[in-house]
Amino acid sequence: MIVDGVASAQFVGDVGVSNETFTFLVQLPPDHDVSLVRANTPLYGTEGEDLMLTGTMKNSGALTVNSYELIYDIDGGSPVLSTLSGLNIAPGSSAQFEHPVPWSMVGPGVHTVTLRPGLVNGAVDGNAVNDVLTFDTKVLLPVPNIIDQYLSGTPSVNVIADSDQDILVPRDLDFHPDRERNELWVLNKDVESSGGSTVTFFDPGAPSMDWMWKRDPNAWHFMSLPTAIAMGDNGFFATCPGVYDANHNGGDPFTGPSLWSADTSIYADVVYGPLGSHFDMLHVNPNSQGIAHDRWNRYWVVDGFNGDIVMNDFTVDHGPGNDYHGNAVIRRYAEFTITKDPNDHIVSHDVLDRSTGQLYVVDHGGQRVVRLDTRSGSVSGPGTYGPWESYAEYSMVTGYDWEVIINSGLVEPAGIDVQGDRLLVSDHSNGDIIIYDLSVDPVAELGRIVTASPGIMGIRIGPDGRIWAVNATTHQLLRLDPEVQTGVTTLVAPGAAVHPNPATDLLYVTGMKDVRIGSGLSIYNGAGQLALRSVYAGDGKPVSVSGLASGAYVLVADGRAEHLRFVIQ
């Protein structure tokens, strides 16, 4: 409803319902009224990381918004207030917001986040009814960093699943971001006429492992010969197609990443929407080779046809099975070239280190790895390829920082992952997984895991810190376990100890003075398998081990290679 040219009220009807009645008062809105419409804040985070609180606001007042206060609190705690200024948001218009002070996530578990506006243009907000946004974010313990354990001894290669579990030409894999679910998704290439498929594994590698194969009825377009999968932090995931034209009719290359729900009751369910279950698709990335999640609905895609890196932000999806793409923001980075496999089979994956903003990209044809600083550069003009539909923004980015960090020792590089200052790259030609040290300049190779399994493409570090991979030649899902070391161990800190040893139900850890309270503790059994995750509560505080079977165990504090041995009896 418009009063004197100002939006005063709006109504949303029920789908499929006619003859609805709405009651309203004809009057001008208050001068100052900021309504918080939507929060685009991750549903999952990792303890110790900073979380930016973002979303969409609307100026529901009668005057232009030049500034407003934005306030948040965690679990009803102390409010954090900042003023967003230098704005020019007209009445009835919406804009994105980002609180400049991140939430430093501490304390594993579910936390309630509350966002609300304060003063608007220095005046009191005239309508408190539409102010508050409340949502939950789950904070998870960090993945234990055990990569250096693979550099000693002989790691074992374990076949977790194969074609008997519907794995057919797998190209990539990823874990659900809620690591406590221990849920792994494998992406199958399949054939062009039907499109790709996924196999979801529940408790992969465990005796209780179960799996579910699914293919969307419109996968021939939205998941055509897919090359990569990336799980988001908001209940969605994205895939990218390896074809030039997803319509397969010789027309424009109407091709790019697709967004899907990670809810298996929605994904690939035929009852959702006229165009299958996909939630969005963008169309300026033909022959895509890799995809890496950033935050919310933002993904980084390797455009194999143009050899560029493209940031694809779906922003607000169009819902399952629909076709509106006008909300998207797309930015193309074209100052270096990625060369895809000319046979369109071996992938060129990428991965984003969210803590630094560095994107690591496999250049398959160049036999190298490139690093791009996603926090550098500036928008320099409209996108130079396509587009074939309208987007909120499609731009070129120039002046960003990038460098070649690995240019030797790779034959057919394909998959990639990163943890801390360790980078892992798979070589399709021989199945080697190479471990690099990112803390030195130039980047140095530390060692190789020889899997003797040529055909490996995607690789991923799992929730327990172990390395997982898919082999497109042997149709296998693999898990690599470091060799269990025996003999004298190094303590986490001088004087560190566990007692009683042997233990039965409670284990007390002492002397870990350089380990931060709240840090994750991982306990591995004699086979090197993660048996328990806990939290370091402080010197002398107990860890419950009552659920562990009798045997020898190793306790490791997150981020450390040192460990303590104990026995359950």
Image: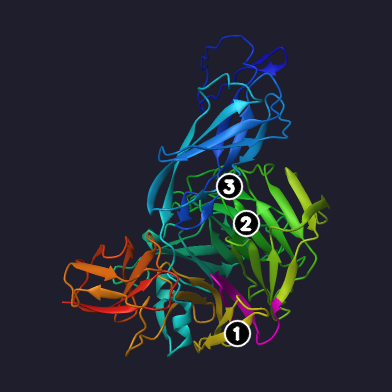
Amino acid type, label 1: Glu
Give the residue at mark 1: 445
Q: Main secondary structure of the magenta part?
A: strand
Horizontal and vertical percent for residue 324? 65, 42
Whole-Å distance between the Cαs marked 3 and 1?
Answer: 46 Å
Amino acid type, label 2: Tyr
Whole-Å distance between the Cαs marked 2 and 1?
Answer: 28 Å
Looking at the image, tell me whether mark 3 or mark 1 is earlier in sequence order. Answer: 3
Asked if the residue under mark 1 is in contact with the one under mark 2, i.e. CB atoms within 8 Å, the reply is: no
Is residue 417 highlighted in magenta?
Answer: yes
Give the residue at mark 3: 275
Give the secondary structure at mark 3: loop
- Bin the neighbour count of mark 3 within 10 Å (Cα to Cα): few under 14, some 14-19, many 20 and up: some
- Bin the neighbour count of mark 2 within 10 Å (Cα to Cα): few under 14, some 14-19, many 20 and up: many
Give the secondary structure at mark 2: strand
Q: Which numbered tag is attached to residue 299?
A: 2
Q: From this view, report whether residue 562 is shown above or below residue 384.
A: below
The quadrant in which residue 88 appears is: top right
Looking at the image, tell me whether mark 2 or mark 3 is earlier in sequence order. Answer: 3
In front: 473, or 480? 480
Q: From this view, report whether residue 169 is shown above or below residue 20.
A: below
In front: 70, or 14? 70
